[in-house]
Image (cartoon, rainbow, N blue to C red):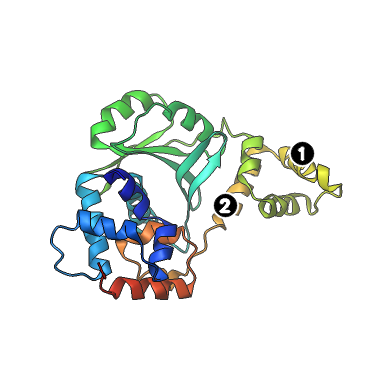
Amino acid sequence: MSNNMLLNRLFTRNIFMDLINENDNSLYSTCVERYVNNITSTKNRALISEIYNYLKKEYRNEYYYKNTLLNKLLLGRHSLNTTTALSEIPINKSKADFVLINGKATVYEIKTELDTFDRLDSQLHDYYKAFNNVCVVTSESNYQKAKRMLEDTNVGICILTDRNTISTRQKPQEDNSKLDHTVLFKVLRKYEFENILLSHYGKLPVTSQVKYYKTCYKMFASIEIDLAYRYVIQQLKQRGFIEIDEYKSVPYELKFMVYFSKYRKNDYLKLNNFLIKHWRG
């Protein structure tokens, strides 16, 4: 397997579930052998830090971007108590890489040094149907290209700098003109659109199971779009669940992976045990 594939797969929920449950994982062992030059400490925490450092210097992949966004924006500028992050949200024919919701919601579309901009237009077109603030996050080397493409638009541009900071070069401007009832409704889970209908109408439709979804959609589509959007954001914001006290002890390198792994208290305990253990090699 190529280097790229190895590193793209390492910082994932499945791999770490294996590791914290004390299952041998050949992918982790291969990464340690390949990316840690001087194994001065064989504690897993130090080894993971070394591998992540390789990402930082040599291969800033999507995980590296997402983890930096989560650390710098959610944990740095906002707070776990007031802000929710979402990832890989299907919107029309696209998937939103990273969404932050506090008072407002912003989609961050990531274009790493390893990506092309080929699909960017259609992705942005999709995102504006479900969210009113959109920002492209890319590298310094891609900035001029992004600037040319997005100059006369409402799309923001953020750069992940070489110093590992997020620099806003073009602020996203709110655009409600493309919000779409159908796309918004499809983002929601059943209990979420039911919450909205109960909130707005005080009741749910009484109809056959076959017609239920369609009838719920019709009721949702009758809500004025700006209000419907506010309802949707309220529901999405409640998706975030994190054991805040336990999460604080998670190393920087693993913040994104753990945030989206739905860890319970016992999982944090197992993660800490894994991190202080020596790699068996």
Q: Which residue is mark 1?
A: 218
Res 74 → quadrant: bottom left
Question: In this picture, is 130 found above or below 79?
Answer: above
Q: Does residue 244 show up?
A: yes
Residue 236 has which mark? 2
SS class of the residue under badge 1? helix
Question: In this picture, is 192 found above or below 59?
Answer: below
Q: x, y percentage for residue 57?
A: 19, 48
Quarter holding the C terminus is: bottom left
Which amino acid lies under the numbered mark 2 shown in the image of this protein? Answer: Leu
Instruction: Kindly identify the residue that appears in the image at 14 percent across and 57 percent down.
Output: 37
Q: Are marks 1 and 2 in contact (CB under 8 Å)?
A: no
Quarter holding the N terminus is: top left
Q: x, y percentage for residue 267?
A: 45, 71
Which circle's residue, 1 or 2, is located before the other in the chain? 1
> Viewed as shown, does residue 212 lie left or right of 171?
right
Instruction: Kindly identify the residue that appears in the image at 37 percent across and 49 percent down.
Output: 66
Res 139 → quadrant: top left
Instruction: Kindly identify the residue that appears in the image at 52 percent across and 59 percent down.
Output: 240
> Viewed as shown, does residue 268 lie left or right of 221?
left
Residue 74 has which mark? none
Instruction: Kindly identify the residue that appears in the image at 72 percent across and 42 percent down.
Output: 220
> Viewed as shown, does residue 79 lie left or right of 192?
left
